[in-house]
Amino acid sequence: MRISKRWVPSIAVPAVIAAGVIAVPLQANAIDLPDLTPQEVMVLMQQANVTEFSGTIVKQSELGLPALEFSSMVSEDSIEQMEEKMPEEFADFVPAVIESNVLTQAVELISGSHTVRVFVSGPDKLRAQILDPMSERDLIVNGSEFWVYDAQMATALNGTIEVEPDPAKQAEAEQKVLEYAESIALDLSSPEAIADYLVSMVDETSQIEVGKDHSVAGRSAYQLIVSPDSANSLIDNAAISVDYETGMPLRVELFSKTQDVAAMSVGFSSISFGAVDQALFDFTPPAGTTVETFDADQLMGYEKPEFPESDYEAPAEPEVIGTDWDSVIHLDKLPESIPQDLMANELFADMLTVVPGGKVFSTPLVNVLLTDSGEVFAGAVTIDYLLSLTN
């Protein structure tokens, strides 16, 4: 699937965030920009057309989570139990996950701080360098070719993906959008009309306003603030910093009701608009690198294996309770693939709060209730609200 030029600036930042990126403290520069309404700031974002830029994105989170070394917490007996419960075809999966510290890396990306250098040129060239304290990971996209490189592990994945969209399905989707827009009298050709509609939708569950003019990465920016209209939500507000000149989002911050500093923020600490050195998108693995080739055709032709019912238990289907900011995910039971000795580990036990009928794993943005009966309730809501759902 080819990426439209107009969406490159929009997807570049989320793509880096997905790999493990986020933000910078507010700068105290005195900025005074022309006053805009929330709708006008949205129009500014819609009209952004930045196709080439480079910069540094810094991730910072204050969730109260420690750096966890999962591999030292999981016993050999627990690994064997997980292997017994997994389908035969996945026999090597569990030890591989444990030894590669995938779980550790997942928590690290959420709880730690990371710095990423990002380069974007046109609709199909991207390079993101995730700078770890002792190593570097790279994602390079150059046309239809991509590389994923891990300097510490001395491994690289290379492949080509060229997926053409189905014209019939694309036309059908576009028609549905047009029909819906017509049904609500929304003019899709008007950025102002779209902005008015979005603000009206937000106003049903939240308050939206323009905050103080400020500086991000040396750029003057507006601040669009969305605050939940819910007593149950842990989130105080979400703030988007929008570049005054280009309309490009420069930073996103999430603030919790439980603390003053941002619980999570993603944004540029420096950014430069203009031509990017094209040599940055050419990659040759260093000597000694183990290179694996990604076969897209093989992936597209993959068929899910069938397992006997006695050997494989399908995971519990999650249920969503509530709507909007009060949405909560509910499971009838904790997945059996999660090792019980991991859950009972002393470090994890210290992170759990005993409540009537269960225990809660709590962060400034999310609460997870594990009931004594084995149910799981998780959401960006208060503990009292989760407990009310068990009655």
Image: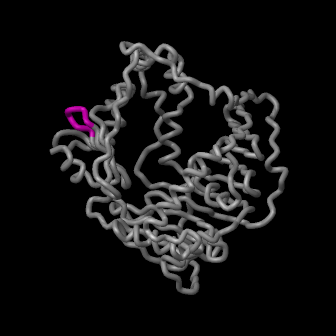
Chief secondary structure of the magenta portion: loop
Name the spot of residue 390 as percent of width and height, x first: 19, 43
The reply to whether residue 368 is in sight is: no
Asked if residue 180 is positioned above or below residue 98 in the image, the reply reads below
Q: Viewed as shown, does residue 15 lie left or right of 264?
A: right
Where is residue 290 shown, x and y percent of the image? 74, 27
Residue 373 is one of the magenta-drawn residues:
yes
Residue 186 lies, with reference to residue 82, above or below; the image says below
Quadrant for the C terminus, please.
top left
Of 136 and 299, which appears nearest the observer? 299
Q: Which residue is drawn at 73% across and 62% down?
A: 51
In the picture, measured across the screen, residue 207 lies left or right of residue 159, that is left
Q: Foreground: 349 or 41?
A: 41
Q: Give the range drawn in magenta.
A: 370-375
Q: In this view, does 367 lie to the left or right of 281?
A: left
On the rendered image, what quadrant is the N terminus found in?
Answer: top right
Query: Looking at the image, is 345 positioned above or below residue 130?
Result: above
In this picture, residue 371 sits left or right of residue 140 = left
Which one is in front, 311 or 147? Answer: 311
Residue 244, position in %: x, y? Answer: 62, 77
Q: Residue at x 62, y 55 (%)?
A: 11
Q: How is the image coloured?
A: one colour
Q: Is residue 3 visible?
A: yes
| Quadrant assignment, res 201 | bottom left
Q: Is residue 126 magenta?
A: no
Identify the residue at image location x=40%, y=72%.
200
Give the image quarter of residue 158: top right
* Residue at (72% x, 51% y) in the render: 126
